[in-house]
Image (cartoon, grey):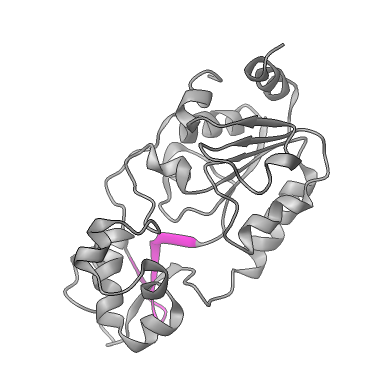
Amino acid sequence: MNELETLKQWVKESSRIVFFGGAGVSTESGIPDFRSVDGLYSQKFDYPPEQIISHSFYERDPAYFFRFYREKMLPLGFEPNITHKTLARWEKEGRLLAVVTQNIDGLHQKAGSQNVCELHGSVLRNYCTRCRKFHSAEFVKESAGIPRCDCGGIVKPDVVLYEEQLDHQTIERSIAAIRNADLLIVAGTSLTVYPAAGLVEYYHGNRMVLINRDETPYDYRADLVFHESLGTVFSQLT
């Protein structure tokens, strides 16, 4: 039995699948990996992306932060791809326990997934830092300069910036799901961003699948490894 047939069999036999995904899940919907430093960034921005989306930079220069955020981190109008849709179907079929994602685009929910642990927050949730009033992503997108609430407070996206702590409850939910998984699929992530990457350490089963174009530090831990795109693999799992 080849690796793909083995994966198909494992999916068929599983009732507690947990999917742990990163940026590679959404790039196939057309959303770029905003952390990549390329010519475009160096032409339009004076600092590395990791510096701009840090808490200290946001505090120091919110106008510059929101300029970058609107251009590079506010992916509106994108649609779920085959991976998002397959995971949502598995959940409806009772096979999938949870999706643990490092992405902030909300595409898993848009595809129909309900139990989604968003480690780094979501661009779809935005709150006034003064009165806590909710604002839509469209409000932030269409605001000029620093988005402000009616009360005058800054409307901050509910995304985890560098130097900020991950939400404790989300971490606990993610750990509980991974510990309880009978099949863990890790996909579209380099597994180099911590503390998120360290969550795979909580899986102690023998059916860990890793799908990523490039090698990761956890390849040696996986029971099946696919160095392919997610679309290539998931299109054969439907």
User: Residue 203 location, x and y as percent?
Assistant: 78, 46
User: Residue 93 location, x and y as percent?
Assistant: 62, 26
**Is residue 133 rendered magenta in the image?**
yes
- Between residues 101 and 188, which one lies in front from this camera angle? 188
From the viewer's perspective, tell me whether residue 51 is left or right of residue 14: left
Q: Magenta region: which residues? A: 121-135
User: Residue 104 location, x and y as percent?
Assistant: 44, 56
Asked if residue 93 is positioned above or below residue 155 in the image, the reply reads above
Asked if residue 86 is positioned above or below residue 122 in the image, the reply reads above
User: Hey, which residue is sitting farthest top in the picture?
Assistant: 1
Q: Residue at x 26, y 74 (%)?
A: 46
Asked which quadrant contains residue 227, the reply is top right
From the viewer's perspective, tell me whether residue 32 is left or right of residue 145: right
- Between residues 37 and 16, which one lies in front from this camera angle? 37
Q: Residue at x 25, y 65 (%)?
A: 42
Report whether residue 153 is seen.
Answer: yes
User: Residue 135 location, x and y as percent?
Assistant: 33, 68
**Is residue 114 rendered magenta in the image?**
no
- Between residues 107 and 202, which one lies in front from this camera angle? 202
Asked which quadrant contains residue 212, the reply is top right
- Between residues 159 and 233, which one lies in front from this camera angle? 233
User: Main SS of the magenta segment?
Assistant: strand
Q: Residue at x 71, y 50 (%)?
A: 200
Q: Residue at x 38, y 86 (%)?
A: 59
Report whether residue 147 is seen.
Answer: no
